[in-house]
Structure formats: structure tokens, C-alpha cells
Amino acid sequence: MIIHLYLNDKELKQEIADDMLLLDFLRDNQCYSVKGGCETSNCGLCTVLVEDKPVLSCSTLAARVDGKHVVTLEGLQEEASELGAFLADQGADQCGFCSPGLVISILAMKKELDHPSDEEIKEYLAGNLCRCTGYMSQLRGIKQYFSECRFHSPSQSEGSTEK
Amino acid sequence: MANINKIVKVNSLTEAYELNQKRSNVVLGGFMWLKMGNRSFQNAIDLSKLGLDQIEETGDAFSIGCMCTLRDLELHAGLNQAFKGGIREAVHHIIGVQFRNGATVGGSIYGRYGFSDVLTCFMALNTTVELYKAGIMPLTEFAELKYDNDILLRIHIKKDQRRLSYQSQRLSKTDFPLITVAVSKKDDCFYIAVGARPAKARLLVKPGCTLNKNSLEEDIIDFSNWAADQFNYGSNMRGSEDYRRHLAAVYIKRGIKELL
Amino acid sequence: MKRVNQSVNKPIRKKDAMALVTGKPVYTQDIAPKDCLVVKVLRSPHAHARIRAINTQPALKIPGIACVLTYKDVPDKRFTLAGQTFPEPSPYDRLILDETLRFIGDAVAIVAGENEKVVEKALKRIKVDYEVLEPVLDFRKALDNKVIIHPEESWKSLVNVGADQKRNLCAHGEDRYGDADAIIRDCAWTIEQTYHTKANQQVTMETFRTFTYQDAFGRLTCVSSTQIPFHARRILSNALDLPKSQIRVIKPRIGGGFGSKQTVISEIYPALVTLKTGKPAMIIYTRQESQIASSPRHEMEVTVRLGADEAGIIKGIDMQVLSNTGAYGEHGPTTVVLTGHKSIPLYGKAQAYRFGYDVVYTNKMSSGAYRGYGATQGIFALESAVNELAAKMNMDPVRIREINMVDKGDVMPAYFGETLSSCALSRCMKKAKEMMGWDEKYPCIDLGNGKVRSLGVAMAMQGSGIAGVDTAAVSIKVNDDGFYSMAIGAADMGTGCDTILAQIAADCLNCSVDDIIVSGVDTDFSPYDTGSYASSTTYVTGMAVVKTCEKLIEKIKQEGAKRLDDNIAAVDFDGDRVYLINTDASISLKALGNQAMCGNNTPLFTTASFSSPVSPPPFIVGMAEVEIDKETGAVDLIRYVAVVDCGTVINPNLARVQTEGGIAQGIGMALYEDIVYTEDGRNASNSLMQYKIPTRLDVGDIQVDFESSYEPTGPFGAKSIGELVISTPPPAIANAVYNGMHVQIRELPITAEKIVNGMTADEKSSGIR
């Protein structure tokens, strides 16, 4: 079939096998940040944004993003650098294999949650596994990042500096 | 991994149902479970165009479209208010947000999996399923049916002032449950669903239950033990038959106490 | 030269950090040629079988298939896949493809084709007639079993490790100091218990993967996610019967190792395909393959006997080990040595010890190297036994360690006779106590809501490199403009050793860490290094960096002196310039670097190699706080406190992350990770759906601090940290469970069901599960 979508804001039209996974489609289109880590939808490494929502690209048929906006880390380099710097300052990048999926999920969390607590952060990211860091440095980096950036929240008045 | 020859984004339910009559065709849910199988399918039926991804709330019921995601359930304000967060409690353990953004309620319920938190939780509520051909039937009845070629369209939960308590236990926080227990109460009737036995959820209905706030601990324990004994249990990688039965009794008791 | 400390002990960002967090394509799969043949392996469905006949014709007929290889297509020379210094203690018991299959998942055939779909199709079309043989699945029944797993005459052992293949014995050893039997017999308090640990998987996020191709000179190039590039070159040479000079191994960024990639898991398959077809080939292991056909921790049963006097001083220690090496012997003879020798020395007042072991073959997946490398299993057993002894004596388990722990200056008979040259273990215990609030909360507090909170403790040690064996060489050159290129052979597996070694070099050379470019590893260009294992990169490769810098500074001074028309005795180097001590006339490093490119006979380049005769142990104290539901036995890990003595901390961020990460793996081993086999020998823990590594909801709050000793033989006083950090959680958590529920779990993982069973079991039960 032919699918038509927006990949990192670029319009794309491509012929694919009907059962092609979004993960393979993305890597075929030079989105190498997207990684596969398991076959059972457990690890979260393959997380990408579809219409701003984090989904597992390994468990999403490419056919299902027809007409949709798909964003990978390749399309969020500025945001990734900004957030990534906070992770890097904790040494939380380690082997880096879980980083793209994690960064995508954190950016999605920032849009969905307003000033999340530690527990809310951990629960939102529970589907992003990491074997190197033990998660603590990631949490430190994320909290630092959140404390220094603005949340998009209609209830929050401009200029509020609540940390 | 499963092989699919063609994906058909159907324009009508009739089209979907006709295609689904062939064994070599299948209805697509979230694709999580289907992907892990080894079967080859001719046509995979995608219901995305049919507006079945909404949760509608009326004065006396919720209608959950089969293509709603588990995340939709988790975040729906009305559902969580009606059942005091019990629905959220049932799904928030499931793997992760991105997984729940893909897994569909229809896939969960249609699958009638042993480990299903959603099935157990819904079973303790006043829940019916709506199938294309067979029409509306209680979830308890649907749960016992074999897989067939009908299509699950919606799940309806009546707002009947039932109060719900959901409990489960896992080896790690986002693993499959060792046991799932949903207890609900309406007036003096208790509805107790126990799943992940490891078999799928079954419902025990106990009308005219005399337990109340002032009941003795022993009486609650006795009742819970009796209730737990009404279900069968088995052993698997995650736990033994005996331990599951022990847990069922404990969680039934805790559910009851929460609702008294 | 006066050193200015700009880098060591500073939390400097990893050099590759920004590339990794922005998702740059730097891993093996990302940089592979697009036209690589896809390689997959057909795997045995039987735990023990012989191939009567194998018909590959139906598979070969499929369009797009480049080759289908069987045992008939491989050299008949046995080798080991273990990444160890030659001569390897691991037996030479492997072929690339064998006629006999020895575990469910063992390689039967190799298929290569244009894409994954045709290769999957071809795998299904290969017809194999198996003669199914009786398997040996219980490691307790393996020794002298009538079924022999390696009867072949071509089996070889290069080093005497007490092996006897006809008995299914991969290794045997015993050593002693003093008369432990007599000592223990006379002790006022004794304990004897048996503990059981499982074949835990490392679960690197990046699975095993390799691509290979023939370069312009016909040499085989192998790009792989490996911790051991140089050993891999030798192993490929052995396996393929190809001279080493015809093989090149390159290591790009890799997504984790933890020891799993200290064994050559995936490389041999695409390598053989490239040799046979002349084409580039790549294999990417699925998660399932990485769970069933990889190199997990050795399953061990450890029996510990302890004797202490009235005051609680542990006088005698006896440890006997049965280790399951699986179908092949990689790392079998060596891991078990650490089980005793990197646990027993913790108890510095012991007057005698006895340590004995058998390593047996079984028809299960071959085990390999996993962080801790045998020490972790020994620590679980010994620390649990010490805790049980303390409980028997009604003594606080922190106290029993305070009065028994080894100290600086102690000679350690159980640690190869080494003298402990640096140790802050007592300070670690003191600080951990404070951080945990041990005295206020030990043993447990009943919360009144059906739950209790309780504490547990354990300590651990490891080594720093393999004494007298691990060898690292480093080269550094001064470039034009005066920046440095440092070539190392140590494999950064995400730990940040590239950065750490640059920090060491930067402080030696008095420059910024940004002035040092680090490259590794390519066996054609990199100086030799045994590889990243045995906790050797900071200590061994770090000292090689120090040595190389010293040599280079001499060269710089020499060159600078020449340009200043004087001799080396008259000058010094401050990192920026070489200057005459008397007149301060100088030449900048930048100028020296530039001038070295014109009319020059002396390259500003040098290399040095280092190996240490000792392996100074780092230490850690771990404490766990758990909350246990008294009715269900469910355990919630609330907090884990750890204090580490790794000598000087080269990079506080990276050391902290290593500790937190290792503890999380230890927590997984303690509470969530189980290996379950079916009756016919199939590994059912074959996915992340079944094998549960901790999520960020499962590790509680991990709090880490450091108490640094100064190790005189290490770079800037550093020891190691890589492996040490995984070993305390299993015994500390088991101790916390005991202190809360009076149930001692002796088989991992600790589960709610085991706790409930322990509560209802007969008190006289021996506790063996």
C-alpha cells in the first residue's frame, strides 16, 4: 500500500508492505535514533510521537500513521539538546541506547503533565527501561530540566516561577 | 511475528463483519498481541474510520468504543469519578504510557485474557458488551464464549451507584498480575470478580450480604475465605495455586473492608 | 612539573554524551553497509541431540538466499568463545556449528539472504533429522552422569583447571589456609547453610550484533558490539582457521555490556558468511536469542560453614561451590575462583579458610561473564551466612561486620596473599549507618497497618583488574596546534571510560580534558588492551595512561629543550609551554606541535604499557529498607543506601551512576529476575515479558555516597568500581526480609510467595528450596 504522512514535518509518500512496522519504516527513512530492544512491547526504546502522543513504533503498523504526524528525535534536535544537556550533566547518558526513547517520552510528558511530582514522573516513564543507570540520575536530570523550563499549562499565569 | 498480506481500512461495519467471516482474516486491535503470534493473515480489518474511539457518557451509562485505548480509560474524568479511581487503578500498572496509548479496550476485552486487569475490573461492574451480530449481552456471558467471527463494538457500563475497589499483586510493578480482584457493592449486594487465577476473571454475586461497618473481623475473613473458595486456581511461572488462593482471600477481604 | 587539578574528581560530561542524547547514529546497526546480507541462525529445539541428516536444498532454492551453512561447512577445530588472555582457562569445546546440539537454542545452521523475510522463510525450510538424546538438566546430577555432554576427542583444555570432560567436569579446585575444620569445630557459634543463585541475564538494551565485510585487501573486518576487540580477533582466527593478521575488529559505540559481550556471541556467524560469500553480512540478535543463547551468570549452589567465638569474631570459613557452566565452558573455570576469593577476604580476622568447587556441564545455555563474575554469588552466600550467624547470636549484623571486617595493612591469605594497601570499609559502614538511620530503625518497625519496615545490610569487595595478567597499552601524540590524540584499547561500553581516561591524561598533562581526543577501538590501530572486564579500565588502563603521559612529557621537554638550545635538565613543562627554569624563555606546546611537522626527526608520540602485580580491592557497604505486607509477603523496596570505597573518585557523576546502575541490577537479581526452565530444558524466561528487569518504579530511592581511601598503585589513588556495585542488594534485601518477617530466603529471587511459605513452614526446615 501507499502511505502518506508527515515525518518530522516533512511530507512523505511511500509504498510499503502492508504489515511493515513503523519502527522499520522510520529506520528505512534514516531515523536511526529509533531503536528496537525487544519483541514484546516491553522496553520503550522505540518510542516515537504520533500526533504528539508517545507510542511504541515496534507495535504500530506503519499503515496506521497514514495521514498523521510522526515525530522522532531527528525532528526534535533542539529540544533534545536542551533536555539532553541536563541528562548529560548527571552522567545519565551512559550507553545511550535508551536515550532517544526516553527523551521523546520526557518531551511528551512535559506537554501532558503540569509540574509532575517524582512519583508522577516515574509512573509516566515506567515503560522506558534502562539497564545502565538505575534511573536515579535520569530523575535528577529531568527534575533539573523541569525546574528551569516553563510548563505549557492554561491554568498557569505567565511569569509564575513555581519550582 | 505475524504476517499480514493486506490491511483494509473499512468504511462500514457491514464491510468489517463480512471480511471477518473468513478464518484467514482478523480484526486489528492495538496489534500488541497479534504481532507476537506467528500466524499469517490475508486481510487485517482496521476499524479506525468508524468513530469507535470515543467514550460517551450519558446520565446512566458509559459507552466505551472498542478502539478506545487503555490510556483513554485511565484518563477519563467521568469514569474515574464514577468509580472513585478504580478504573485507573486497574490499568495504570500495565507496562507504560506508550503501551497504553496503543492497546485498545476492545482488544483487551475481546481477548478475554487470563491476566487482564480490564476484564476483571469491568466484570465487577454492571457491564455489557455490544457485538455486531449477537447484539448486547452481559460481560460475564461474553467472557465464557469461545472466539468467533463476531465483532466487538462497544462496552457499556451502567452508572448504578456501584462502588468499586480494585486490587492486584505483581512481582514487579508493571508485570502481569499474579491475581486480580475487583469488588463492588450496591446496597447489600457484593460483586466479586477474581482473575489472573491464572485463568480469566469470573464473577461471584452475593446478594443480601449482611456484612456492614460494624461486622467482626472474623466474619469478614470467613466470608472472604468462602468467596475465594468459589474460584479455581492454578500454578504457573509467577505463582502457585495455593498462593493465589491465599491472595484472593486477602484481597477480597481488603476490597470488602474498603467498601463497607 | 607542577600538577593543576582540573579534571580528576570532577563531574565532567562524557565526551559522547550529546551525540547519545540527541540520537546520533553511532551504533553497530546504524553504521552497517545498507547491502549487508541478513544473517540468522537456526536453533536446536532439543536440549541434547545429534543431527542425523540435514537437508538445506529447500532453503537454498528460495530466491534471495545467498548461503545456508551447516556443520559440514565449518572448520573442525575446537575453540573457546571466552574473552580471556591467552592461554585461556576456558576449555576449547566449541565449533561454529556442531553435529551435536547441547542446549535448546544451540546453533544448527546459518542462513544469509537479502532481507529478513526470505531468511525467516528459509529457516523454516531447512529439514533436520534429529536423534534426540537424553539431556542433563539438573546441575546437581551432572557430575559423573552417565550422559556425557562433551565426549568428543577434540575437546581441549589449555590450562590445568582440574577439568575432566568424561565426568562433565569443566573445572575443579580446592585450596585452604590453616585447618578450617578444626577451627570451626572449636567455635562457640557455628552456622552451615546452602544458598542458590540463578543464571541471571545482563539484558543490555542493545542486543548482540555484528557486521562483517572484506576490505580492499581481502581482509575480514568485523564491526561488533563487543567488550573485547583483541580477544575477538584471536577467537575469530581460531574459529575460522584464519591468520590473525587477516582479521580486523572494530568497536563502535555499544549499548551496554556488563560482561555479556566479554564472550564472542554473534561475531562468528556473519564472519563465516562473509568468508563464504565475499559479501558484507550482519546479524542482529533478537531479544529472545539474547535471552536463550547468550552468556548469563553461572547458576551456583554455595554451601557456607562459619565458626565464631563467643565475642562474635569469625575464626573459620568453609565455602563449597557447585557451579553450572551450561553446555559450554566459557568463563566456567574462572568465575568460580572469585566466588570464594572475592568474598572470604572481607573477614580479616579469620584464621583459617577452606574453599572448594566443582564446575559442571549441563544441557542448558552456556553461562559467561556478568558483572561480579562469581564474586556476586559468593557474596550472596557468605553475607547471608554471616547475617544468619549474627541472628543466631542475637547480634546486630552491622556490629558483626564492624568487629570482623578486613582493614588496611592486613595480609589476605584468601586474596592470593596480597596485602591490603587501601581500605575505607569501616568508614563506609559508619556513613551507611548514618544515611540509613540504622540504629533508630533496626531491626524493624511495625507500621500498624499490616505492614512492617525493616532493614538489612551486606558488604562486598571485588578486584581491580587481573593481577599479573591484564595488560593495557596507551598511545598519545601531540598534534599540530598542541592538542593530543590518545589511542586506547579499552572498550567504552557506555561507562564513560573514554572520558575518565581523558580526565586522567588531562591532569597528567596539565591541560583541559577537551584538548584530548580519545579513539578506540580498532585492532589495526589501537594499542593492545585486554578489554573492558575485570574492572580494569580505570585502574589498569588508567595507569597505562599515567605512564604514557610521563613518557610523553619527557619527549616534549626534550624537544622543547632542543628548540631552546639547551638540554632537558634545564627545562620544565607546565602543560602550555616548555620553559627554561632559569630564564623563563619558552616555547609553547602549540608551536612545538606545529614545528614537529617540518624538518623533524622526532615524532611527539609515545606509547606505554602497564600491568599490575596486584589487584587492589574496592569495597562497598549496602543497606536496604523494605516494607513488607505481613499477609501477602509482598516486598516494597523503599530505600537503598550504599557507600563506596573505590579509592580516588575520578569522575563523581560517573562513579555515582555506576553505583546506582549496579545496585539496580542487584535489586533485580534479588527481587524480580528469575530463570525458569521447562521440564524438557526450554528457557521460558525468554523475553522481557517474562524476565523482569527493574523499571524505575521497582528500585526505590537509591542513595549513594563515597568514602575514599587512597590506593598508592592506582592512577591518582583510584581503584575500580565497575563490578563491585552489583553484589550487595541480594544479601542486604534477604537480611531486611529476615529482620522484618523472620524468614530467611536462601534461593533467589526473593518473592512474596517464598516469604509466605517461609512463615508457614516448619522451623526445622533446612531452608533449601
Image (cartoon, grey):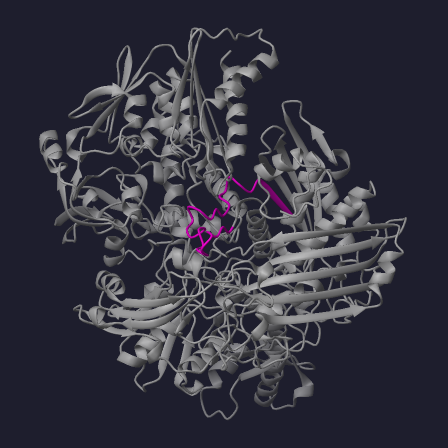
In the image, residue C692 sits, relative to residue C480, either above or below, namely above
- Residue C583, by quadrant, is bottom right
Q: Magenta: predominant secondary structure element?
A: loop
A42 or C441: nearer the viewer: A42
State the image coordinates of residue C393 (x, y, percent, origin top left).
83, 43
Q: Is residue C617 visible?
A: no
State the image coordinates of residue C191 (x, y, percent, origin top left).
78, 50
In the image, residue C164 sits, relative to residue C764, either above or below, namely below
In the image, residue C668 sits, relative to residue C168, either above or below, namely above
Q: How many marks?
A: 0
- Residue C161, by quadrant, is bottom right
Residue C681 falls within the magenta-colored stretch: yes
Q: Furthest residue to the front?
A: C146
C582 displayed left or right of C544? right
Range of residues picked out in magenta: C675-704
Residue C680 falls within the magenta-colored stretch: yes
State the image coordinates of residue C117 (x, y, percent, origin top left).
22, 60
In the image, residue B73 sits, relative to residue C53, either above or below, namely above
Q: Residue at x 28, y 14 (%)?
A: B61
Q: Residue at x 39, y 37 (%)?
A: A110
State the image coordinates of residue C404 (x, y, percent, origin top left).
82, 54
Q: Is residue A117 visible?
A: yes
Q: Residue at x 35, y 67 (%)?
A: C130
- Residue C756, by quadrant, is top right
B101 displayed left or right of C397? left
